[in-house]
Image (cartoon, rainbow, N blue to C red):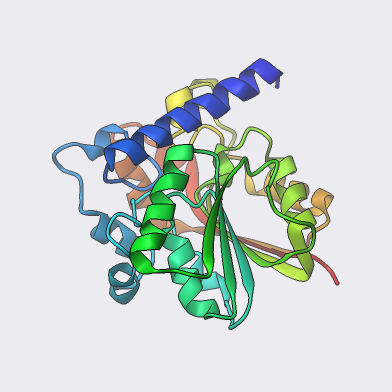
Amino acid sequence: METKNLDEIRQAVRSRYGEIAKQESSGCGCSALSSCCGTTLAPIEKMSQAFGYTKEQLESAPEGANMGLGCGNPQAIASLTEGETVLDLGSGGGFDCFLAARSVGESGRIIGVDMTADMVSKARQNAEKMGAKNVEFRLGEIEHLPVSDASVDVIISNCVINLSPEKINVFREAWRVLKPGGRLAILDVVALQTLPAEIKNDLSLISGCVGGTEKIEAIETMLAEAGFQDINIQPKDESRDNIREWFPGRNLEDYVTSATIEAKKPF
């Protein structure tokens, strides 16, 4: 892919989510600005519960942190423990970071990284509302993480890596910042079959978490090339109805699904 195209994709993604942050828009899964966000949009809470968040989790975060932009609940697979350092790739308004902070306790640490300045500002404001002392948000690209080598126990991410035009670099960076024995606990959208050109080349679908997806086999190969072991990717068939709501009438649920992605950095 040419550099111009990479930059075009990044700018489309940055613009889309910057607009969401400024407008404080309600989301509809990853596709927050699609036609599904018209008069028939389900409340964020309903969508989030459909993706696996509990009512208690939804009520625990400050208002505005949950923007309804995910495709699952990383907390369900991360198995976070007291004192761990957690990195969230594409942290948005900070929702998953605040949930993770509850699991790691005061002795733990949460770092959220997002490429959109307005999202980072929003997340920092939410952290102030909560008085969260062990959560920080950094501006940066997930292909070039502003995080030290071997400093993180767990990496979580929610429907973000599909947005990157350089996914192998994301996984290489993830491997770099994880401690030996560290792990990935990611929810993302993956391709069920090769995407037609009209989907792959549509910037609205790329920034809507569909056009940039890769097949499971390709993701497994990238993770292995980055150095990860114990790779486990599990499609979530129940996400079909949710994905149908992102872009009604486009039949995109035939091409993509959400999935859990787990892997470990060897000791």
Which residue is farthest bottom? 82
**Depth order, front residue of 178/49:** 178
Residue 98 position within the rendered picture, expressed as x and y whole percent measured from the top left = 44, 66
Quadrant for residue 118, please give it.
top left
**Depth order, front residue of 38/114:** 114
Residue 158 position within the rendered picture, expressed as x and y whole percent measured from the top left = 50, 54
Quadrant for residue 58, please give it.
bottom left
Quadrant for residue 182, please give it.
bottom right
Residue 14 position within the rendered picture, expressed as x and y whole percent measured from the top left = 49, 32
Instruction: Report whether residue 13 is seen.
Output: yes
State left or right for residue 69 relative to residue 199: left
88 vs 218: above or below:
below
Q: Give me the residue at 55% from left, 39% from top.
A: 115
Residue 26 position within the rendered picture, expressed as x and y whole percent measured from the top left = 26, 46
Which quadrant would the N terminus be assigned to in this image?
top right
State left or right for residue 170 relative to residue 39: right
